[in-house]
Image: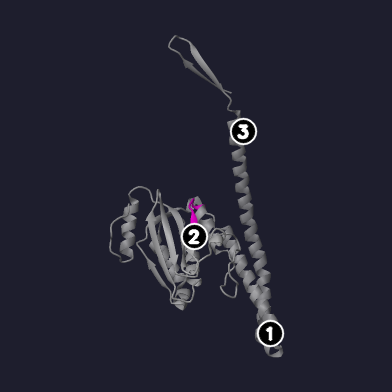
Amino acid sequence: MLVLCTPTSDGGVVSAAIDVSRVKRAERNLEARTAELERSNAELAQFAHIASHDLQEPLRTIGSYLKLLHDGYQNQFDDQARLFVRFAMDGATRMQQLIKDLMAYSKAGADPTLRTSVPLYGVLETVEEILSEEISNADAEVLAETLPTVMGDKARITQLVRHLMDNAVKYNNGTRPMVRLSVKRGSGEWIVAIEDNGIGIAPEYQDKIFDMFKRLHLRDEYPGAGIGLAIAKRIVEGFGGRIWAESILGVGSTFYFTMPDLPGDQNEDAYRFGQAARGQPNPGFAG
C-alpha cells in the first residue's frame, strides 16, 4: 500500500492510499516469464547444436556409402536400382541441408552485444561475391541505389540480404532477372527494399511465406527447404525491425525490411561515404 500526503492551504493534509500490490505482482510475473524465456531459448540453442552434430555424422556416413554404391557398382545395377540409389542420395543431401538450415535458424536471433555500424554497400558486395555463380548462371543484373550504414550484426545482415537476393535471382519467370536494392528514411530507421521482376506471389500467400518450411512450388521447379524467409524474418525481428512483401503474380515482388538508424550526425557521413564507395554521384542526403 502506497500512501500519498498533500498539505492543503488551511493547514490540513489530504491523504490518498494506492494499492500497488497488483503492479508488484505483475512486475514479478514479467520477470519470471522473461527468465523462463531466456532459459528456454538457451536450451533450444543447445539442443539445436547437439542435434545438428549428432544427426550430421550418421548422415555423412549414409551419404558416403551411397556414393560408393553409385560410383562403384552402378554398372551392376539395372535402371530401377540406379534410380533408387539416386533418390536415396538426394534424400540424404536434402536432410543434411535441412539440418544446416535449422541450425542457421536457431542462431538467427540477434545478439545485442554484436551490434555495430554496418555499411550496407559492404554487405551487398559480400553477397554479390557469395552468389556470384548464381548471378552469373542466371545472367542476373543487380542494381543498387546509394546504401546507408545501419546498426546491427554484419554476419546476420549479410545472411538476411543473401536469402532475399538468392530468392530474387532464383524465382524468375524465364526472363533476365533484375534485382534492385533501394532505401528510404523512416522514423529512426532505414526501410530497405529488394525488388525483382520474377514470378511474383499470389496475394493469399504473401503473409504465409515467412512461415517455417512454407514452399509454394515443387522442389523440382525451385530447390530449397522453405526456411530462408523464416530465417530472414527471425534476423530482422531480432533487431527490432519489420519485414513484409508486396507482390504481383507474374510481375515481380518487393521485400521490405527495416533496420535501426545510426545515432546523431553519423548517418550523413556514413551515407556519403557509401556513395563514394560505390562510385556514385552524391544526390544529397535524404532527410
Q: Nearer the viewer, mark 3 or mark 2?
A: 2
Percent x, y of residue 3 = 54, 20
How many other residues sit within 10 Å of disc 1, few (<14), some (14-19) or many (≥20)? some
Q: Nearer the viewer, mark 2 or mark 1?
A: 2
The count of marks equals 3
Which residue range is magenta in the image? Answer: 238-244
- Amino acid tagged 2: Ala
Determine whether label 2 and label 1 are within 8 Å by CB. no
How many other residues sit within 10 Å of disc 3, few (<14), some (14-19) or many (≥20)? few
Q: Which residue is mark 2?
A: 245
Q: State how far apart marks 3 and 2 are (Cα).
A: 40 Å
Q: Is residue 30 left or right of residue 129?
A: right
Q: Which residue is mark 3?
A: 25
Query: Which of the two discs, 2 and 1, labels the residue nearer the N terminus?
Result: 1
Instruction: Classify mark 2: helix, strand or loop.
Output: strand
Q: Residue at x 43, y 60 (%)?
A: 193
User: Is residue 209 in view?
Assistant: no
Instruction: Please identify the residue farthest to the bottom as the structure is shown.
Output: 75
Query: Which of the two discs, 1 and 3, labels the residue nearer the N terminus?
Result: 3
User: Is residue 51 in view?
Assistant: yes
How many other residues sit within 10 Å of disc 2, few (<14), some (14-19) or many (≥20)? some
Q: Which residue is mark 1?
A: 82
Query: Which of the two discs, 3 and 2, labels the residue nearer the N terminus?
Result: 3
| For residue 113, above or below residue 137 | above
- Amino acid tagged 3: Arg
